Image: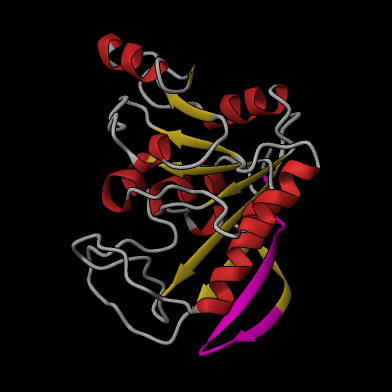
Amino acid sequence: MDRPFVFINSAMSADGKLSTKERKQVRISGKLDFERVDELRARTDAIMVGIGTVLSDDPSLTVKSPERREARKTAGKSENPARIIVDSSARTPLDADIFKKGEGIRIIAVSKSAPAEKVKKLEEKAVVIKTGAEKVDLPELVGKLKELGINTLMVEGGATLNWGMLSAGLVDEIYTFVGNLIIGGVTSPTFTDGEGFSEAELLRLELSSVEKIEDGILLKWKVKGKRN
């Protein structure tokens, strides 16, 4: 399948949690990791998150550094990568930060069963891609993104989107920053939620590098067990 190069970037607690049981984002990494993530954003063609992340964190997904934004413009690109929300039911708030902050294309991926009135309002603010009957068809979506000229795609979660992308065999690399705190909680989101793999299906990774950053560790993995 012709698709972009896809990597997930995520920060998690030492026990693998992305946020608290209230789904409130906590600061897991420090300034150096923040700069690393901003550099990743500046180098990619598009950033993708799930609707759960938008509803709980309301991220703008912009490149924060003026120098990096300027470098993108000098290279003939918009100052921010394309920003994509996977939103099967078209629940993205019309006043979300993604619409209010920064230049650049916004893309909302919805299912064909999303309410027509909500889709119409989103179409006034973003490019809307319809795919999948009840839920967004992720393999079809990434194929459409490739057709739009997106060659590198950065996935910033959360747990449901990470699972969807990994279980569909659509991820090439994973960057996980593991921070020095414990969050706990049976309902706290982990790096991947979803239904989970059986023992026979387990996804195998190859460790590319390990780097200590401030009080945490950055792990870089290649996904070996891609199924597509």
Residue segment shown in magenta: 210-226
* Residue 195 visible in the current orientation: no
Residue at the extreme bottom of the image, as rendered: 215
Name the image quarter holding the N terminus.
top right
27 horizontally vs 30: left or right: left
**Where residue 158 sits: x, y (%)?**
41, 52
**Where residue 182 sits: x, y (%)?**
33, 83
Q: How many marks?
A: 0
Name the residue nearer the viewer: 181 or 30.
30
Q: Quadrant of residue 208?
A: bottom right
Q: Residue at x 26, y 10 (%)?
A: 117
Name the image quarter holding the C terminus.
top right
89 horizontally vs 67: left or right: left
**Where residue 109 sits: x, y (%)?**
46, 26
196 horizontally vs 95: left or right: right
Q: In this view, does 53 lie above or below 88?
A: below
